[in-house]
Amino acid sequence: MEALRKFQEGVKGDLEGSFTEILMEALPSGAFAIDRSARIILWNRSMENISGYMRHEVLGKHPSLLAFQYRNGEVCPNNVEECGLFVKGEITDMECMLRHKSGWFVPVLKNARAIPDRNGKIIGAIESVTDITSVLKIKLKAEGEHRKLHHSMGNIIGESALMQKVYDSIRMAASASNATVLVLGESGTGKELVAGAIHYQSDRAAHSFLPVNCSALPESMLESELFGHVKGAFTGAVKARVGRFEEADRGTILLDEIGDISPTIQVKLLRVLQDHVIERIGESRQRRIDIRIIAATNKNLEHLVRDGKLREDLYFRLKVFTIEIPPLRKHKNDIPLLVDHFIKRFNRENNRAISSISEEAMRVLMEYDYPGNVRELENAIEHAFVICQGNQIELFDLPVEVRRIPCNHSQPQRKASEKKNITRDELISLLEECDWNKSMVGRRLGCSHTAIWKYMKEWDIPLRQPPRSNGNG
């Protein structure tokens, strides 16, 4: 134990052949020791195998040559004072990436413990590094299968002619795995699902699919999110960070809400599309990347170009291959399929056994125009699951705005004065057409069912449908 005693007392010395070295060589994981100035003093054979660096190449050097990067994109600090190990005393089960001597990154699990002398002063540390490539492959495969399932064509529901065109476009885009794709569609139409389906049917499917919402972050944060930054690049940049473009290398990145990016980001994005290189903020080094870019927006990009808000050259770079997703109001015949899909999904997720939807509730869903598109329909069914007490969704299980508020994008609504000019005979005709359903009549006229009830009381119209004559006189 003399070697350990010497190490604990801060005597570096020659540890060749010592118990410490023998112990480290016996470890199946990579292991190395550093002194108080963070210089490597021990390096075992497993560490050579994991990193590619031989012992004589690293002794006396700083472990920053391994360029440890954490899973959140942060880079391990080079400065001992900034290293959390000497402050916290240990690092436990930290998943990160280690840069191999040949340049590629190896996923590892890192553990470390600071070593104090007899007086409690930190004199160094021992770190162990376990190669988790095989474990991570299994994990990523499982996650990838889940994402692939979520973004599969099977989750894009519809049998209409309009949706068949979307499916054909997805297949064509997937076969051309390097072409930039522009996905157009109103909010809630499923642009991210389409982008994911393109990725997971392409030859990039084994690599990352990373969606970034360009409207969710201010310009400075979005630039850092996409391109990364070096330490000290701006106030608050206390650590280096890898950007999304680098993370998506060999995979696909979805730039959602592309119409909201600033002129500065537009210039940098144009360079990515043209030259396939990026520069981290605060760094002049160019980094080559191999990614596919899919952009999505609910805005009219031609109008943005005309108004000077979007660069024309960027617009043409983005619209190499365009897919336009139709709004739900233009393919309402797909609503029953979508409703059935959501009922099955929410049954699984909530351990429910709702089997169907009433005819009246389905009729209301078919009449509504969905400004929020498929997402709004999905939310309506989820709302119904909260309210529904039986095994069938009824009319009043649906959200009130779907039941009562007319939302017609294609036809102008009547003015209030026009709604009030209806006659008694017209109201009776509408009641007959709607099977005496006052809520449906109200939607036709743009009124509440209470207003219809008041008209009926005023004009002495029966509140229930009169019995039909049997023809016997």
Image: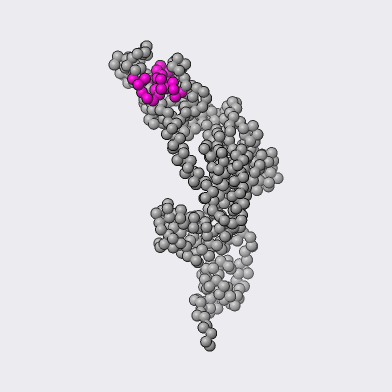
User: What residue is drawn where x is 30% and y is 18%?
Assistant: 118
Q: What residue occupies the far left of the structure in this picture?
A: 1
Say which quarter of the image contains residue 129: top left
| Position of residue 64 measured from the top left corner of the image (x, y, whole percent) | 47, 22
Query: Quick check: 75 left or right of 25?
Result: right
- Residue 323 seen anywhere in this rendered image of the structure: yes
Q: Position of residue 161 (x, y in %)?
A: 61, 56
Residue 49 lies within the magenta run:
yes
Q: Quadrant of residue 386?
A: bottom left
Q: Position of residue 311 (x, y in %)?
A: 68, 40
* Residue farthest right in this picture: 306
Above-or-below relation of 65 to 279:
above
> Is 435 drawn above or below residue 316 in the view shown?
below
Q: Looking at the image, can residue 213 be seen? A: no
In the figure, 377 relative to 265: above or below? Answer: below
Q: Nearer the viewer, residue 424 or 189?
A: 189
**Highlighted range, magenta:** 23-51
Residue drawn at x 47%, y 42% is: 145
